[in-house]
Amino acid sequence: MSTATDMLVSRKYAKRSGLAEIWYRLKTNKGAIAGFTIIVIILLITLYSILFIDFEEVTAMNAANRLQPPSLEHPFGTDDMGRDLFLRTLYGSRYSLLIGVGGVSISLIIGLILGSVAGYFGGLVDDLIMRFSDILASVPVFLMGMVIVTVLGQSLQNLIIAVGVTAIPEFTRITRSSVLVVRNQEFVEAANAIGMSNLAIIFTQVVPNGLSPIIVTVTSRIGAAIIEAAALSFLGFGIPVPHPEWGLLVSEGRNYIRTAPNLTYFPGLFIMITVFAFNILGDGLRDALDPKLKK
Amino acid sequence: MAKALFQVRNLKKYFKTSRGVVHAVDDISFDIEEGKTLGIVGESGCGKSTTGRCLIRLIEPTSGQVFYRDQDICQLSRAEMKKLRKEMQIIFQDPYASLNPRKSVLQIIAEPLLYNKIMPGADKFAIEKRVLELMDKVGLAERLINTYPHELDGGRRQRIGIARALAMEPKFIVCDEPVSALDVSIQAQILNLLKELQRELSLTYVFITHDLSVVNHFSDDIIVMYLGQIVEKAPADELFENPLHPYTQALLSAILVPAVGANRDRIKLRGELTSPIDPPPVCRFAKRCNYYNQDCAAGVPPLLEITPGHFVACHRIKPGSNTLVEAN
């Protein structure tokens, strides 16, 4: 029995899901493609730095090379300890990406759970979760970040947690509002009628249909998280020296801003470009996911 | 007479709102016999959909009993109810909103099979085979198996909804205005399909609609609801030949007659639906009734058997009289 009957009938017919259509619309959006390209380049830089630049190379001091202006040998110049700023900046990209993606993952997972439970069940559960989220949101972002880092100690991991926790209210609120839109639709009732459990309904029916605003928030929040982390590092609450985190590089260059502005400009430029790339990708996604823009 | 499949007793569903309690369904009782179709008719907001959803416990009734095969389903636990769900399904009004837009036809129809483990140990070939069977049964071409709801027209979508309901091999289906969102030409197709399926699978239907002309050829018995209460209940033929309640008469006169120059004496109702929020204990139709007099304020009229099998709730109609008391 190894004939055509063994093949799934559904294989015979083309499938054009909503996702394929979104990808098509995204491809035609110049901003999104530009953002996406920049992000890919930054990822390649990170990959290169992981493979070919070692920690020794970017932390070893060399007093003879102090504060060199940009040259062919040192494209971004050297810092006050004679370290090559170009290599340090490339090396630092991993921290920013890790903080952006890791921080947003934390807030996304927690926000998704809290928001969907609040939106789906409503009532007292909703009130409790949303008031908790309001309390969290009412604490200024940097104050919260500084408190978390101070309590937990300075490290990459704690910086990620600090950045992640501050964005939980935003994700909770966005998830809740999209769940509220979806949960009263008839297909949710239909799922109820076939005996699906609440949990299954939330994750197979409600969340996939309320995902668009969440995806958009994820991309733009990654940019915001990178900025926040850089700012915390700048203030001295980030990854401890000598790790070349971008915010820390900017902070170190601050003392020489009159004599050697390249020390601040180049890492700052990298922060700016990365954040910008994530933001325009987010904007492009928002347009691609909006069904009203369908032709 | 065979024992009824469903026995609904004093069913009530109240919704608390900030402006008061909405009496969506207010103390109604009726039976549904196996293999028959019960039509529930009424204008929007009269509680007919709420009644349908209470029958299969998609909404928890405020009070009252719903006996299914002599078992009060309102008292069942979640797990027991899940087992019963296989026997009772619902077809929704809006085929656009009732299908998950992110799932393909295959996934939508397979969902009830997978979640209820109706085919234990079945591999994806068996599941797909069953889905194709169901698609064939409701008249969907095999090539549509991978399409998404947004690619299909209303009639096809409604067929998907029907196939999904049939996947559970139910005994009882609530059809909640299944054709009111469709074009007239497609309405007939879907109605014929439902009728065929009923014959083939010996299904019991509750058919909810606001359109009496649809329910006419479809139902064995008809309940007319007004503001959460039953105002008239009769076998379909009897109701159409001899409508007694003033509201039913008005509804029947609103049916379009497809004949040139047809003599149409339409009974026009004045005013709007009175508010279902904390209604006073009088006849709820009184404010719009053409036969209103002071008797009508004497409490909510009980549903009385006027002639055998024909029940009416009106102060102006006395048992045995078989006609409406003339207006003064």
Image (cartoon, grey):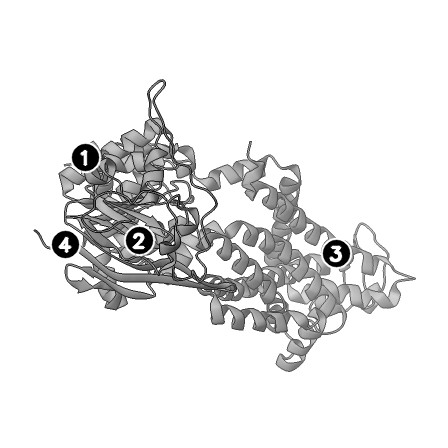
Does mark 4 fall on the same chain as mark 3? no
Asked whether the residues under marks 4 and 1 belong to the same chain, the reply is: yes
Q: Nearer the viewer, mark 3 or mark 4?
A: 4
- The residue closer to the viewer here, A188 or B4, is B4
Alpha-carbon span between mark 2 and mark 3: 93 Å
In this view, the residue farthest toward the bottom is A151
Dot 2 and dot 3 within a common chain: no
Q: Which residue is mark 1?
A: B196
Q: Is residue A225 left or right of residue B147?
A: right
Which residue is labeled 4 in the image?
Answer: B4
**Up/down of B302 relative to A252, above or below:** above
Residue A168, quarter of picture:
bottom right
Residue lying at the far top of the rendered structure? B260
Residue B130: give x, y in percent of width and height. 21, 42
Residue at image point 76% right, 58% down = A267
Picture coordinates of residue B251 (x, y %)? 35, 39
Residue type at mark 3 is Phe
Amino acid type of the residue tagged 1 in the rendering = Glu
Above or below residue B38? Residue B282 is below
Residue B315 numbered mark, or none: 2
Q: Name the secondary structure under disc 2.
A: loop
Callout 3: chain: A
Cα distance between the residues tagged 3 and 1: 76 Å
Residue type for callout 2: His
Q: Earlier in the sequence, mark 4 or mark 2?
A: 4
Q: Which residue is mark 3?
A: A86
